[in-house]
Amino acid sequence: MSIAEIRKLFLDRLIRFYGPFFGAAVRPTEISEDFRYIKVEMPLTFYNKNYVGTQFGGSLYSMVDPWYMLMLIKNLGNQYIVWDKSAFIEFKKPGRGKVTAEFVLTLDKIEEVKKHVSENKKMDVHFEVQIFDEQKVLVARVDKTIYVRLKP
């Protein structure tokens, strides 16, 4: 097993037992070695079910919260500061079973961020994440803004 595979396995295990994810049953099902693709799922359980028996909105948001920030940190390198800045979630349909979300960070997006930050010292990077149910029906849409700047 390579060092990269060991690191990925360690991160995967750490994420699975992270409190907010463990309690809501959020788990990554795929994480690419280059950390530019992640797929996450969350089944409907007693711990993430709301009063009316559907996915709790906070759990839906928590399943998508950290990924783009982590992906940018892993792909930009140590000379950047990367923080979650803001988010907006729009609920489209109640989640009544397992829901999934996918995160893709393209090389073009990475280069765009590096170029913009090198010229302007900072940038707000925008991403949209869609959460789907098992029938591929849109449950929620999340707009994420990640702040990136060069370290002093």
Image (spheres, helix red, strand yellow):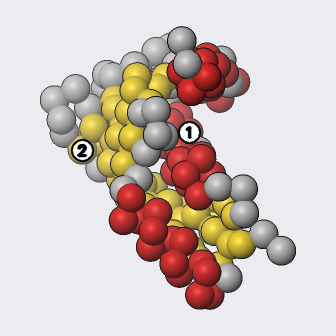
138 vs 152, nearest the viewer? 152
Task: Kindly identify the residue that appears in the image at 39 percent across and 40 percent down.
Answer: 37
For the residue labelled by badge 1, is the local secondary structure a helix, a strand or a loop? helix
Mark 2 burial class by Cα count in 10 Å: few <14, some 14-19, many 20+: some
Q: Position of residue 69 (x, y in %)?
A: 59, 52
When asked about the image quadrant of residue 13, the answer is: top right
Q: Amino acid at mark 1?
A: Ser
Residue underneath mark 2: 138
Q: Amino acid at mark 2?
A: Leu
130 vs 60, nearest the viewer? 130
Q: Quadrant of the N terminus?
A: top right
Position above or below: 4 against 136: above
Residue underneath mark 1: 62
**Which mark is on residue 121?**
none
Residue 33, can we see it?
yes
Q: Position of residue 125 (x, y in %)?
A: 51, 69
93 vs 99, nearest the viewer? 99
Task: Kindly identify the residue that appears in the image at 65 percent across and 55 percent down.
Answer: 77
Q: Position of residue 96 (x, y in %)?
A: 31, 26
53 vs 85, nearest the viewer? 85
Residue 52, can we see it?
no
